[in-house]
Amino acid sequence: MAAVPAALGVLSDQPRVRDFLATALADERLSHAYLFVGPPGSGKHEAARALAQCVVCPQGGDATCDDCRRVAHHTHSDVHWLRPGSATGYLVAQVRDLIADAHLAPVRARTKVYVLERAGLLRGTAANALLKTLEEPPRDVMFILCGRTTAALLPTVASRCQQVPFSVVSPQVGVASVMRSCTATTQEARVALAVAGAPARAVDFLGSPARRQVRRLVVGTLDSLARADSWDVLVAAREIVAGVAVPLADVKQAQEEAVKDSTDFLSASALKQVADANKRELTARERSGMMEALAAVDSLLRDVLIRCEDVRGPIVNEDSAAVVDRLASECDTRAVLRALEASARAADDLAHNVSPQLTVEVMLLRIKEALTCPPSFR
């Protein structure tokens, strides 16, 4: 068995993927394009980050050098992260910019890496524009596409990629993985997984006081919602959105430092592409933080539903059991289901680029109405 680079250590819950990539690296038989396929929370994006670290790191992925840290912070000049430019999918202009950039020489490393998230939204003209490059890729360029299923992709695009399937990670395995990676209790690990998803992201969540504070804001807001007036709701929404923005300051600073390092050898047009990419990155990170906040809402409401249904067994938010019990005593199953619908609609609104502030305001007002409206009026 090939030695596993330190960067691939995050894939302990996907041993087959880890060993497959480690062997490809050791044998120097990497593909020019990979398609990572699996359900949310299976670790596809962590795998893309780890593989990118192995490719650009002078030590082959030690996970601690400057290059690896830059990849982890999404500020490496030769590792590009792309997300759909609109709610309906990737834009043709995005793909054309990618292709133009791919034909430029790397800045720091020997290879450039392009990670396309939500690859299922690479459709139509945008997909066809990328196809030619996948068929005849520039030298020293790697593409990593991440998606839930191959069915959503253009068959000709999927066929040009080395497919790497990711399996579902069970809750028990996820909790054990988080506890191995940091000094977390079982209860903390379960909460982190409920909010952040994949084990690697859950570990990051536990290591971020700002992100944990957002969850506390969510719990406190739901606890006081029945007694809040409309103005209180608007203030609470503003506090949650502001809390999500706190970690972004460090990301923005890292971006600015990376641009400063590249100013001397990048053209004006290339610098503009970097600035546009950085702006998209900040927007995507804000949306990711908002989705964590909504996941915290969803998790707490599901615990309330368990109490309303009098189902035996532990709840996820044991540290907020008093809040869960209080909410359950004040409403019924039907009310909680309506509140969960409001949370789901908020997630859909965010996916369609509705402003975070408006999304949270509307969601909280709908949840308040659902949980406090008398049964006869529901």
Image (spheres, rainbow, N blue to C red):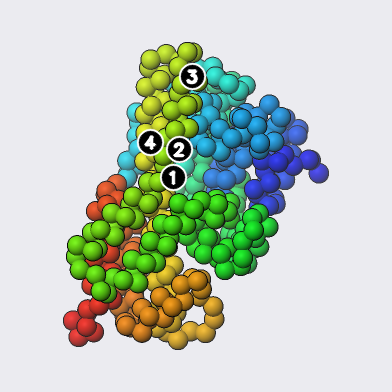
Residue 32 is left or right of residue 16, and the answer is left
Element class at badge 2 = helix
Taking the spot 54% from the left edge, 55% from the top edge, the residue there is 206
Taking the spot 75% from the left edge, 34% from the top edge, the residue there is 26
What type is the residue that disc 2 sits on? Val
What type is the residue that disc 3 sits on? Ser
Mark 4 against mark 1, which lies toward the viewer?
1
Residue tagged 1: 247
What type is the residue that disc 1 sits on? Pro
Q: Are marks 1 and 2 in contact (CB under 8 Å)?
A: yes
The quarter of the image holding the C terminus is bottom left
Residue tagged 3: 262
Which numbered disc, 4 or 2, marks the residue that appears first in the sequence?
2
Tell me the distance, in whole angstroms, between the alpha carbons under discs 4 and 1.
16 Å
Residue 151 is left or right of residue 182, and the answer is left
What type is the residue that disc 4 sits on? Arg
